[in-house]
Image (spheres, helix red, strand yellow):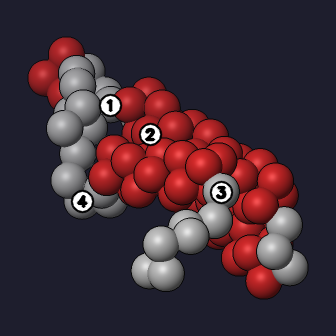
Amino acid sequence: MLDCNLLVQALDRAMTSLGQNDAVAVIEHLEEAKEALEKAQASLNQRTQGLNFTGWYANENKFGIQNLIKTLDSAILKYRRGPDRSGR
């Protein structure tokens, strides 16, 4: 649960930084959010019990952590590239 709270906190800070046009801070907070998600995934993986449940969360689809990480990776890349000057 701590990692989920850290995720939300980092996303909130990223949104605040976005409103302040601070791309460096946006990237920093998105990376914090990604780290929190990765720790949450690791926590899930450590919660398996016994040989029958080894890898139980390896392909988890209830929380969509891997999809969220991919989304964060895309957002981080977008803000590293700078503003979109195409008018979109």
User: Which of the two marks, 2 or 3, is nearer to us in this view?
Assistant: 3
User: Which of the two marks, 2 or 1, is nearer to us in this view?
Assistant: 2
Q: What's the distance in space between the residues labelled 4 and 1, CA to CA?
A: 15 Å
Task: Specify the quadrant that holds the N terminus.
Answer: bottom right
- Count residues near mark 4 (Cα–Cα under 10 Å), then give few for <14, some for 14-19, many for 20+: few
User: Which of the two marks, 4 or 1, is nearer to us in this view?
Assistant: 4
Q: What's the distance in space between the residues labelled 2 and 3, CA to CA?
A: 30 Å
* The one of 1 and 88 positioned closer to us in this rendering: 88
Task: Name the residue beneath numbered marker 2.
Answer: 41
Give the amino acid at mark 1: Thr
Give the amino acid at mark 3: Gly
Task: Name the residue beneath numbered marker 3.
Answer: 82
Give the amino acid at mark 2: Gln
Q: Is label 3 in a helix, a strand or a loop?
A: loop
Residue at the limit of the structure toward the front, as seen here: 86
Q: Going from the N terminus, do you reach mark 4 or mark 1 first? A: 1
Q: Is residue 43 left or right of residue 44?
A: right
Q: Going from the N terminus, do you reach mark 3 or mark 1 first? A: 1
Residue at 38% in and 47% down: 70
Quadrant of the image occupied by residue 79: bottom right
Task: Name the residue beneath numbered marker 1.
Answer: 48
Mark drawn on residue 62 = 4
User: Which of the two marks, 3 or 4, is nearer to us in this view?
Assistant: 3
Q: Is residue 87 above or below residue 53?
A: below
Q: What's the distance in space between the residues labelled 4 and 2, CA to CA?
A: 12 Å
User: Label 4 near label 3: C-beta < 8 Å?
Assistant: no
Q: Is residue 72 above or below residue 45?
A: below
